[in-house]
Amino acid sequence: MSRPGRDDLPDRLYTLTGGRSRSAPGTPFDLVTLMVAESQPVPGMQSEHVAILRLTERPTAVVEIAAELRLPVSITKVLLSDLLAAGRVSARHPHKAAQIDPDILEQVLVGLRNL
């Protein structure tokens, strides 16, 4: 059984990214970063860039984009960094859950036990 992105010819992936194997330094991507298109595709764009812009018309996680494109996440991040540098997409990080103080949880537990 073939796995998406794993069985692609290395030269195809090399061509997609112009030989780069990592996104630009300082790019804010992790697997759950939400990407949002800031523009429409234009004629002459690389087909993967066009696909990304269409996928990101609504906020879409980096990992979802990679899965839809059937590309490794590392290659997807390179393509996303190109679009980010061109101002065609923006990155939004999901909000982290607030840290709950263990002392408050202990007080709640004691209060529940006292009921």
Image (tube, helix red, strand yellow):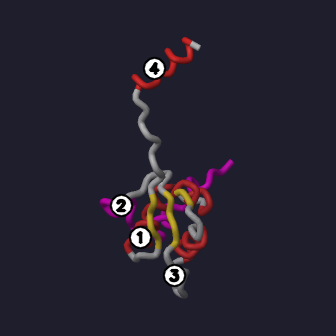
Q: How many numbered discs? A: 4
Label for residue 45? Answer: 3
At numbered mark 2, what does the secondary structure look like: helix, strand or loop? loop
At numbered mark 4, what does the secondary structure look like: helix, strand or loop? helix
Q: What whole-number distance in Å separates the C-alpha atoms at marks 3 and 1?
A: 14 Å
Marked residue nearer the N-terminal end (2 or 4): 2
Residue matched to label 4: 107
Marked residue nearer the N-terminal end (1 or 4): 1
Residue type of the residue flagged with mark 2: Thr
Residue matched to label 1: 84
Assess whether residue 50 is covered by the magenta stretch: no
Quarter holding the C terminus is top right
| Of the pair 83 and 111, the residue shown nearer to us | 111
Q: Residue furthest top?
A: 114
How packed mark 3 is, by other alpha carbons closer than 10 Å (few <14, some 14-19, many 20 or more), is few
At numbered mark 1, what does the secondary structure look like: helix, strand or loop? helix
Residue matched to label 2: 27
The reply to whether discs 2 and 3 touch (Cβ–Cβ < 8 Å) is no
The reply to whether discs 1 and 2 touch (Cβ–Cβ < 8 Å) is yes
Q: What whole-number distance in Å separates the C-alpha atoms at marks 1 and 4?
A: 46 Å
Q: Residue furthest bottom?
A: 43
Give, as a single range, the part of the protein colored magenta: 1-27
Q: Is 115 located above or below residue 6 in the figure?
A: above
Q: What whole-number distance in Å separates the C-alpha atoms at marks 2 and 4?
A: 42 Å
